[in-house]
Image (cartoon, rainbow, N blue to C red):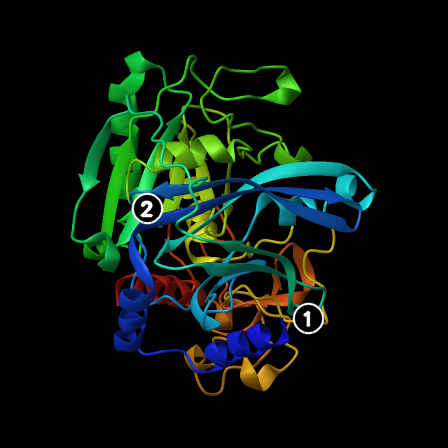
Amino acid sequence: MRRLLLLSVAFQLLPLHASAQQDLFDRYFDKGCLRVDLHHTGIGEDEVYAIDALIREPYWAGNPRNLIDDMNLGEHIVRVFDLATNTLVFSMGYCSVYAEWATTDEALGGGAKTFHESLLMPWPKAPVQIRVEKRDGRNIFRSVFDLTVDPADYHITTESRYSHFKVKKVMENGDPGSKVDIAILADGYRSDEIHKMENDVEKFMKILFGVEPFRSRKSDFNVRLVRSVSGQSGVDNPRESKYRDNLFGLSFNSLELDRYMLSLENRTIRDVAAKVPYDQIIILANEQKYGGGGIFRLYSTCVSDNEFDGYIFVHEFGHAFAGLADEYYSSEVAYNEMYPLDVEPWEPNITTLLDPERIKWGHLIAAGTPVPTPDDSIHAGATGAFEGAGYSAKGLYRSSHDCIMKSKTLDGFCPACREAIERMIDFHTR
């Protein structure tokens, strides 16, 4: 165990060049995806993982030249080691619904809950050890779960579900291994509403790729729609006792926050998304009520017919794709003490400013700009460190006066967010 941990640290400190990582892929992996489905249960401060299923899927859309994730993003990270040599061959940071639930009153009060989660990785040629690590209160990763998987295990299923759902290529720019692949799934659209589904997708693609840096990097994306249909229109709205026969079970009032719209049907989401190569899942809800959600490297959700739906779509995609934090600080949230002020957040667009000389986006700040930066008319267009972010008016800082991650606007992302998005696009494509 200790040897494996030291190896993982060494790989983080010395990331491999793209050509070396391509060699790593060719040596240890084959075409296809290994999906590990887990039950993740929390009871008070204790948490337990249990295997649900091992599945071989036809597509792994990741970049074979970037197998080792050195971006230090996410509440969790999965690390995969070749069992015979203890070589770290794959890693990926991510977030989960569980990690958000663990900060709620229900969880902190000793409540118990189980969430279904999936780990995805390229198909291994030989047995591997898979390790899940989670950040502690000081943002240090600690091991919480290990398992060994032999790709020759006959218990690994290859069943393909939802074969009747058709796929539409919305945008096709190249091989999945060198593009960001978006899978759009639809919830609350009946079979006679497919035309509306496709029109809604077209609307949101125009909005997303009208905002920088997505506009300039449009050729780095593939987008595919899985025409997933439900028995009824709309999604659940518990506060109004409205429940719908919708495929993915999208629901408002997730984690007891009315506007927060999530799905807990992870198995269904993964089964449907497996029809296409994907790096990112977007679930579009056939709804008018304001709401959405975004969890890093899990999925983003958005309603289709609200006054602010375009803003919601881009904002939530920012969370899910680039791990961006919310920069607002006056709205109600579902969490408790999300950002302790004596720890630097892992999110790339907010800081506790513990070391003003080494801000994450310090290279973007012009000489002479004061840090912290006054939020006044003189510095309105500057890049700096403006107080108020991450649900806290004090002690957390953002890079500019305004941003899509702060206000209901499509005027643009702040410099720190734009740089984080570009970095993630590069991770998938270069």
The answer to whether residue 409 of the structure is visible from this angle is no
Looking at the rendering, in which quadrant would you find the N terminus? Answer: bottom right
Q: Is residue 222 left or right of residue 73?
A: left
Mark 1 packing: few (<14 Cα in 10 Å), some, or many (20+)? some
Residue 170 is marked as none
Residue 61's x, y, as percent?
30, 52
The residue tagged 1 is 343
The residue tagged 2 is 278
**Alpha carbons under labels 2 and 1: distance apart:** 33 Å
Residue 56's x, y, as percent?
37, 43
Q: Is residue 119 left or right of residue 276?
A: right
Looking at the rendering, in which quadrant would you find the C terminus? Answer: bottom left
Mark 2 packing: few (<14 Cα in 10 Å), some, or many (20+)? many
Image: 199 above or below 113:
above
Q: Nearer the viewer, residue 22 or 30?
A: 30
Q: Is residue 341 left or right of residue 413?
A: right
Q: Residue at x 17, y 46 (%)?
A: 172
The amino acid pointed to by label 1 is: Val
Image: 419 above or below 43:
below
What element does badge 1 sit on?
Answer: loop
Q: Nearer the viewer, residue 247 or 200?
A: 247
